[in-house]
Image (cartoon, helix red, strand yellow):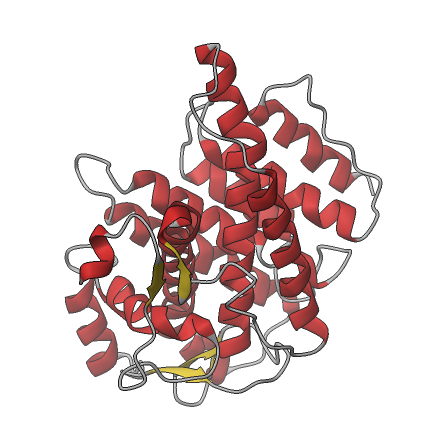
Amino acid sequence: MEWIFKSTGEINHYNPHIHEGTQPIRVLNHMNVHMFINTHPNFAEELKKAINENGLSSKINIVFGETRIERTPYIRNDNKSIYLDETFLSYLWCICHTVWTVYIQEIDFPRCNSLNGKEVYKIDAQITEKAYDLFDYAKSLIVSYSKWDVDKMPNPEKYQAEYRDFIEQPNGFYTEAIKFILCHEYIHAIKHIDEINAGEYENSHFIEFEKEADYEAIELLKKGIFPNRINQIAVHVGITLGILSMLYFRPNTDAPRHPNTEDRLVVALNQLELSDDSPCWGIALIGMDLWAKQFDLGINWNTELNEKEAFEDFIAQIKAL
């Protein structure tokens, strides 16, 4: 555990005896399971009941392999087993790192420095550039697989202690995003799969199931916010990033069996009852702006508005496409 106290030099978390897989995201797989089981103080008991009474599989399956993203997370109807694609996990971490880093470097640090009238936080153009490069890598995984270069690109496995905040803070948001995704699938297991298996449904029914799974998953995560709220930002940002990660697969946001992605985001942020100055507004703006530029959609971020107002304006522009 010496790495906890390091302030300089390399930190390398990889242990071949415990970390399965070939992608550097492997070092967080055990943490994902731990965080999910401990979604809130009584959730482990809820899981036991779901396993014993609802037929939920006790195993979270990671499909390992050096392939492009084959599928986003899902739960099988026949055995209620949750499946996660290893490359999708890598992709999600990259999205978390990019959006958070760009938010810190381009919004948060400049604002703090301006309020203090001096440079309190160093703005590092190289850190920002690497974040954008990592976003390009994440997008490439949708089309084809390529190796994540742990010596050149930010990653959770191997990094310099001097820049640990830009790795370890995204780690926390990533595990919260995974927790949200797993809780979403858990709700499907206990509330929807038996109904789906018993009859035929129109796509509108599946959309309602998806809405309920989002709502109930967020409520589960809210129950896990500590009384002192020390983990509240991590939970809020993780949910925001988990939904944003669905944007970058295509230029449109609609799907036959899912609500529009921007609608999911709006509903989630409202459900979280965010303060007007929550970082989630800016994070959501960064994430949507990356998507709009990715597909050259011509949506403009109105920087004259505060971040919540700019978010609402951005959503209105998406609706007008």
Q: Measuring 48% from the left and 39% from the top, which residue is drawn there?
A: 269
Q: Mark yes or no: residue 169 visible.
A: no
Count of residue discs:
0
Q: Is residue 64 left or right of residue 6?
A: right
| Image position, residue 168 (x, y; %) | 36, 52
| Image position, residue 106 (x, y; %) | 59, 32
| Image position, residue 197 (x, y; %) | 48, 84
Quarter holding residue 149: bottom right
Q: Measuring 43% from the left and 63% from the top, which residue is drawn there?
A: 181
Front position in the image: 10 or 302: 10
Residue positioned most to the top: 117
Quarter holding residue 227: top left
| Image position, residue 200 (x, y; %) | 58, 80
Q: Is residue 140 above or below residue 64?
A: above
Residue positioned most to the front: 9
The image quadrant where one finds the N terminus is bottom left
Q: Measuring 50% from the left and 35% from the top, which residue is drawn there?
A: 104
The image quadrant where one finds the C terminus is top right
Q: Is residue 94 left or right of residue 171?
A: right
Q: Is residue 210 above or below residue 165?
A: below
Front position in the image: 288 or 263: 288
Front position in the image: 144 or 236: 144
Q: Is residue 264 left or right of residue 301?
A: left
Front position in the image: 262 or 91: 91
Q: Is residue 36 above or below residue 115?
A: below
Quarter holding residue 62: bottom left
Q: Mark yes or no: residue 183 visible.
A: yes
